[in-house]
Amino acid sequence: MTEFSASQVVETNRLESVYGLSVELIDENAESVTYRIIREFEVGGGAYAVLQNESAGADDDVQILKIETSAEGEIQLVTIDDDDEWENVAELFDELTFPEEM
């Protein structure tokens, strides 16, 4: 069970307002990969982005990343290193996406 609930979510569009409907990220092979922005939201003091590889099929897994702002004011996407935080956000995304199943 997540410590967050759908009623606490605030939908945002910080990435979309800067980058449009997709963002390019560098993968572990140092190659540029385009991801479609599926959803952006804030909850529990954190901001998160759910992304899907544009070349992936509709059923492929999504990437969930934390949205942070650098000291220079630039938006950055960072990996969620805390397992509990990642699990909470992933479960919340599932709840938002498939509310009847929760």
Image: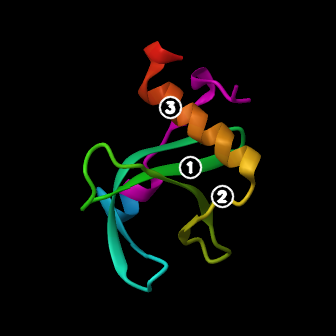
Q: Count neighbours of disc 1 (C-alpha within 10 A) and say few if under 14, some if 14 to 19, many if 20 or more.
A: many
The image quadrant where one finds the C terminus is top right
Q: How many angstroms separate mark 1 from mark 3 (CA)?
A: 14 Å
Q: Which mark is residue 94?
A: 3
Q: Which residue is at 66% across, 58% downward?
A: 80
Give whichever of 30, 72 is nearer the camera: 30
Please state the horizontal and vertical placement of residue 95, each as a whole percent of the image.
52, 26
| Left or right of residue 99: residue 43 | right
Q: Which residue is at 50% across, 31% downward?
A: 94
Query: Which secondary structure, mark 2?
Result: loop
The number of discs equals 3
Please identify the quarter of the rendering in which residue 35 is found. Answer: bottom left
Q: Count neighbours of disc 3 (C-alpha within 10 A) and say few if under 14, some if 14 to 19, many if 20 or more.
A: some
Magenta stretch encompasses residue 4: yes
Q: Are the residues flagged by discs 2 and 3 in contact, CB closer than 8 Å?
A: no
Can you identify the residue that label 2 sits on?
A: 80
Give whichever of 29, 8 is nearer the camera: 29
Residue closest to the far bottom:
30
Give whichever of 84, 69 is nearer the camera: 84
Task: Decide: is 89 above or below 26.
Answer: above
Q: Are the residues flagged by discs 1 and 2 in contact, CB closer than 8 Å?
A: yes
Q: Are the residues flagged by discs 1 and 3 in contact, CB closer than 8 Å?
A: no
Magenta stretch encompasses residue 40: no
* Type of the residue with mark 2: Ile
